[in-house]
Amino acid sequence: MSMILSASVVRVRDGLPLSASTDYEQSMGVQQCRKYFKTLSKKLAQLPDRCTLKAGQYNINFISSLGVSYMMLCTENYPSVLAFCFLDELQKEFITTYNMMRTNTAIRPYCFIEFDNFIQRTKQRYNNPRSLSTKINLADMQTEIKLRPPYQISMSELGSTNGFAHLSAAEFKGTGKISTAPHQRLEAVTLPGIVSFILSLLCGALNLIRGFHAIESLLQNEGEDFSYVIAFFLGTAACLYQCYLFLYCTGWRNVKSFLTFGLICLCNMYLYELRNLWQLFFHVTVGAFSALQIRLRQPQGKSPDYNV
């Protein structure tokens, strides 16, 4: 019998489970597939936005959008078009019910467990296709899947020690890969993010001006320390690089942000004699605030084109 067995909602960034269906199926195959759920959850940020994993008599399908992934387990003979229509319904309801701020700041696993009620109702409908009738447009989904089929994850890829990092860009071509490439779109800019960007530019400009003044002083007085000039210009570069990291997605973005903030702190420590405590506090605080905003503005999964 073809049917949907379980479903879950997971945050793409770190694999945190946000909600899941209450399941009573205890067969060995289903229990093993739940382990695959956990493994896939840790790799969502490296995977395309629409995938299928064939695991024996079962299929795991998922879609990712706006930093959240919707996963489902079904029997191998369950129609793919119905599976992705089911995931599409979960996505629409979840986006309508919970805003991005809540999902981004969630800390506790299954903090949206009440969404299970909707998952169960929708699962019952899709396990009885006759009741669907005109509630979904199968033709649109069939066309979408034909034009952009889900990426097929192999079991060997799932079990590799290096995850999916070894897959080439050509293998993901046309699959809507959620990557950390520079052209990957980030989540929408927030007001605190705009403020941090402007303040970073201001700090960079202040460092640049003080750097030129330090050069003038160096030319007029041979005893001046040239290292102060270097510190000012390094501070400028660090502030501008924080602006770049806020605007664009790059590999190891969070690590780069942390190291850049560390450079800002070191530069200001070295310039302790040339700045008062308020100036030092301002520069370091802006650097920390910008690093936080870079951390909060995560890559955005490609939003599926169907019925949105």
Image (cartoon, rainbow, N blue to C red):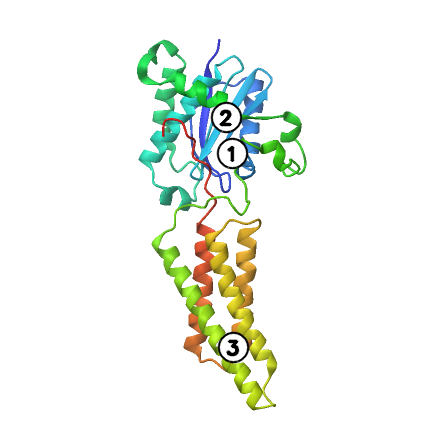
Name the spot of residue 78 as percent of width and height, x first. Answer: 49, 14
Name the residue beneath numbered marker 2.
Answer: 148
Q: Is residue 30 left or right of residue 89?
A: right
Quadrant housing residue 8: top left
Question: Which label's residue is closer to the chain start, 3 or 1?
Answer: 1
Name the spot of residue 236 as percent of width and height, x first. Answer: 51, 69
Residue in view at x 36 percent, y 16 percent = 125
Q: Secondary structure at mark 3?
A: helix
Q: Is residue 226 left or right of residue 93?
A: right
Question: Which label's residue is closer to the chain start, 1 or 2?
Answer: 2
How far apart are the alpha carbons under marks 1 and 2? 9 Å
Quadrant housing residue 165: top right
Name the residue beneath numbered marker 1.
Answer: 176
Q: Secondary structure at mark 2?
A: loop
Q: Secondary structure at mark 1?
A: loop
Camera-side residue: 33 or 196?
Answer: 196
Label 1 close to label 2 by CB (< 8 Å): yes
Name the quadrant of the C terminus: top left
**At label 3, which amino acid type do we have?**
Gly
**At label 1, which amino acid type do we have?**
Gly
The answer to whether residue 9 shows anywhere in this view is yes
How far apart are the alpha carbons under marks 3 and 1? 45 Å
Q: Is residue 67 above or below residue 93?
A: below
Q: Is residue 241 above or below residue 107?
A: below
Q: How many residues crowd mark 1 within 10 Å: few (<14), some (14–19), many (20+)?
A: some
Name the residue beneath numbered marker 3.
Answer: 211
Name the spot of residue 75 as percent of width and height, x first. Answer: 51, 15
| Residue 103 marker | none
Question: Which label's residue is closer to the chain start, 2 or 3?
Answer: 2
